[in-house]
Amino acid sequence: MAHPSVLDAPAVPAPLPTIPLSELAPFAIFGSILALVLLYFVGAEQGAMSIVGGSNVHEFVHDARHLLGFPCH
Amino acid sequence: MVRTLLIRGMLVGVVAAVLAFVVAKILGESQVGHAIAFESAHEVAQTAHEPEPVSRTVQSTIGLFTGLLVFGVAIGGLFSLAYACAQGRLGALRARATAGLVALAGFVGVYLLPDLKYPANPPAVGNPDTIGERTSLYFSMMLISLAVVIGGCVAARRLAPRFGGWDAALLSAAGGLVVVGLAYYVLPGVDETPEGFPADVLWRFRIASLTIHATVWATVGLLFGALTERANRTVPAVTPAPAPTLAGERPVASSGGSPVASGA
């Protein structure tokens, strides 16, 4: 990370460089969508609604879904 | 910059998932087992358990691990993006403190606040006919909680120049509590624990769930912070660029600690 403003002695907390929101936006949008799709398959697929059909996804991640606190069935 | 953070976040998420798997195996699986035993003994409703397309062995090992792994990577990635946004915007905090606070906010917003209203339920608890309603209630509560936490952080930042970091954080947290309390009051409750379900199993299951989430968020926050801190220190010496003092980008909040609010 080529941000030079953190070069002071470690004892003195120099303010960290901010990342411009415009630079962050594409990562944030694409990353969030992707992560939400992943979370959907662990947390909700074949529960209240179903994209793939059947119950194999639901049953496979069954224990994780319960233990992570998502409504399961 | 963001790329490095995103990759680091996802890798840290993998580590978090491995630790969460250990916790889930030790604390969680025994309770899931008790709950399923209750379910079979009482033939509770017609839950999706009869045909068993996936064996219990698979569910409690590779299935559990896969679920936690996907969850960990997704949370790690989202966390790193939130960190990238928070870095340098929470006052004079170093990387590991920033990462710790972002993880705390994530834990509170994604798990703790929604879970206090709609707690985790083991198999046998919950009526399959209401799964649609319960799912939308749960995710609505999560959205509200996340909005409150993020809103609280933004509010604390805005209030910091006027009230100082500490008081700004307290004020924002109080405001967040009011909103969350209102949501708790307005949204309907769910009481679907079947007659005779052992209270101890329910309690231990929920504690296991809480511990799993705490493990994930603590690992992500602390490990990500440590790695980022180390990377920042080993940055090769370059002449410091003039500090980008965009107005409002970095409120002077060092007087009273961090202006960040956990939102609750």
Image (cartoon, coloured by chain):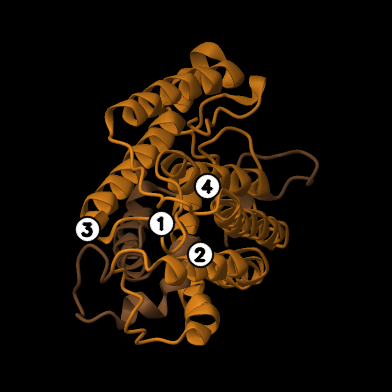
Chain colours: A brown, B orange
Tell if the residue under mark 4 belongs to the same chain as the one under mark 1. yes
Q: CA distance from mark 3 to mark 1?
A: 12 Å
Tell if the residue under mark 4 belongs to the same chain as the one under mark 3. yes
SS class, disc 1: loop
Name the residue: 41% across, 50% down. Answer: B193
Marks 2 and 1 in Cβ contact (< 8 Å) = yes
> Which is more N-terminal, label 2 or label 4?
2
Task: Tell me if I can see residue B34 in this picture.
Answer: yes
What amino acid type is highlighted by mark number 3? Asp
Category of crowding for the residue at label 3, using alpha-carbon neighbours closer than 10 angstroms: few (below 14), some (14–19), many (at least 20): few
Category of crowding for the residue at label 1, using alpha-carbon neighbours closer than 10 angstroms: few (below 14), some (14–19), many (at least 20): many
What amino acid type is highlighted by mark number 2? Ala
Q: CA distance from mark 2 to mark 3?
A: 19 Å
Residue wearing tag 4? B107
Q: Name the residue furthest top.
A: B162
The label shown at residue B125 is: 1
Residue wearing tag 2? B35
> Which is more N-terminal, label 3 or label 4?
4
Chain at numbered mark 2: B
Chain at numbered mark 3: B
What amino acid type is highlighted by mark number 1? Val
Q: CA distance from mark 4 to mark 1?
A: 24 Å
Category of crowding for the residue at label 2, using alpha-carbon neighbours closer than 10 angstroms: few (below 14), some (14–19), many (at least 20): many
Category of crowding for the residue at label 4, using alpha-carbon neighbours closer than 10 angstroms: few (below 14), some (14–19), many (at least 20): many
Marks 2 and 3 in Cβ contact (< 8 Å) = no
Tell if the residue under mark 2 belongs to the same chain as the one under mark 1. yes
SS class, disc 3: helix
**Front residue of A48 and B205:** B205
Name the residue: 39% across, 58% down. Answer: A70
Residue wearing tag 3? B129
Chain at numbered mark 1: B
